Image (cartoon, rainbow, N blue to C red):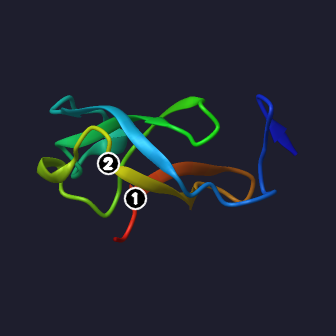
């Protein structure tokens, strides 16, 4: 399976960096209870940038250049979303 030229499932992406981050107060019913939440632009090891969320990290600890790795959230049996978490040092 491929997604815009990236082979999904072939390997786990591991060395990526936060390129841009923001924390929003906007409320959408999906995010109720999660406000404020973050939106990050992550530059993948391959040079592609992807918009996602950073998990397992307080919003005030997010830093540009922070190394992150991908984790997948199963939304349904057919759909998993790529999220990112800080790399353990």
Compared with 85, 51 (above or below) is above
Q: Which residue is mark 1?
A: 85
Q: Who comes first in sequence, dot 2 or dot 1? A: 2
Mark 2 touching mark 1, by CB under 8 A? no
Q: In the image, residue 82 lies at what x, y percent?
A: 56, 49
Q: In the image, residue 83 lies at what x, y percent?
A: 48, 51
Q: CA distance from mark 2 to mark 1?
A: 10 Å
Image check: 16 left or right of 28? right
Q: In the image, residue 6 lies at what x, y percent?
A: 76, 38
Compared with 5, 73 (above or below) is below
Along the line of sight, the residue nearer the viewer: 25 or 18: 18
Density class for disc 1 (Cα within 10 Å; few <14, some 14-19, many ≥20) is some
Image check: 85 left or right of 47? left
Density class for disc 2 (Cα within 10 Å; few <14, some 14-19, many ≥20) is some
Q: Secondary structure at mark 1?
A: strand
Quadrant of the drawing holding the N terminus: top right
Compared with 83, 19 (above or below) is above
Compared with 14, 50 (above or below) is above
Q: Which residue is mark 2?
A: 66
> In the figure, residue 3 lies in which quadrant?
top right
> In the figure, residue 73 lies in which quadrant?
bottom right
Which residue: 11% across, 49% down? 60
Image check: 33 left or right of 55? left
């Amino acid at each position: 399976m491929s997604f815009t030229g990236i082979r999904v499932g072939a390997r786990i992406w591991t060395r990526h960096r936060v390129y841009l981050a923001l924390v929003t107060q906007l409320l959408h019913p999906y995010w109720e209870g999660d406000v404020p939440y973050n939106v990050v632009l992550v530059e993948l090891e391959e040079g592609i940038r992807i918009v996602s969320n950073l998990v397992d990290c307080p919003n005030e600890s997010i830093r540009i250049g922070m190394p992150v790795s991908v984790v997948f959230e199963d939304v349904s049996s057919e759909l998993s979303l790529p999220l990112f978490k800080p790399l353990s040092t």
